[in-house]
Image (cartoon, rainbow, N blue to C red):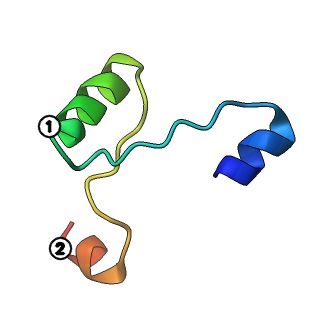
Amino acid sequence: GGEICREWGLEWIFRVWRKQGGFRLSVERSTKMGLYRQRYCGCIMSIRDE
């Protein structure tokens, strides 16, 4: 991600969102921004359970 950001003149913000309540914060922020969030990780097994 950092390399692509440099190519496009964007700022890369590295953060592990799973730690210290980060996942909850990412959900809150993305919801507030109106971003789509899928309910599965994307692997075939999780899609089957959908």
| Rendered view: 48 above or below 9 | below
Question: Which residue is nearer to you in this view: 26 or 39?
Answer: 26
The residue drawn where x is 41% and y is 19% is 33
Q: Earlier in the sequence, mark 2 or mark 1?
A: 1
Q: Which residue is mark 1?
A: 21
Q: Residue furthest top?
A: 32
| Amino acid type for the residue under numbered disc 2 | Asp
Choose mark 2 or mark 1, whichever is in front.
Answer: 1
Q: Residue 50 appears at what percent x and percent y? A: 21, 66
| Amino acid type for the residue under numbered disc 1 | Gly
| Rendered view: 27 above or below 46 | above
Q: Residue 16 appears at what percent x and percent y? A: 34, 48
Question: Which residue is nearer to you in this view: 24 or 15?
Answer: 15
The residue drawn where x is 73% and y is 41% is 5
Query: Which image quarter: residue 25?
Result: top left
Q: Residue 46 appears at what percent x and percent y? A: 25, 73
Check contact, mark 2 vs mark 1: CB within 8 A. Answer: no
| Rendered view: 10 above or below 16 | above
Query: Which image quarter: residue 15?
Result: top left
> Which numbered circle lies on residue 49?
2
- CA gap between label 2 and label 1 equals 26 Å
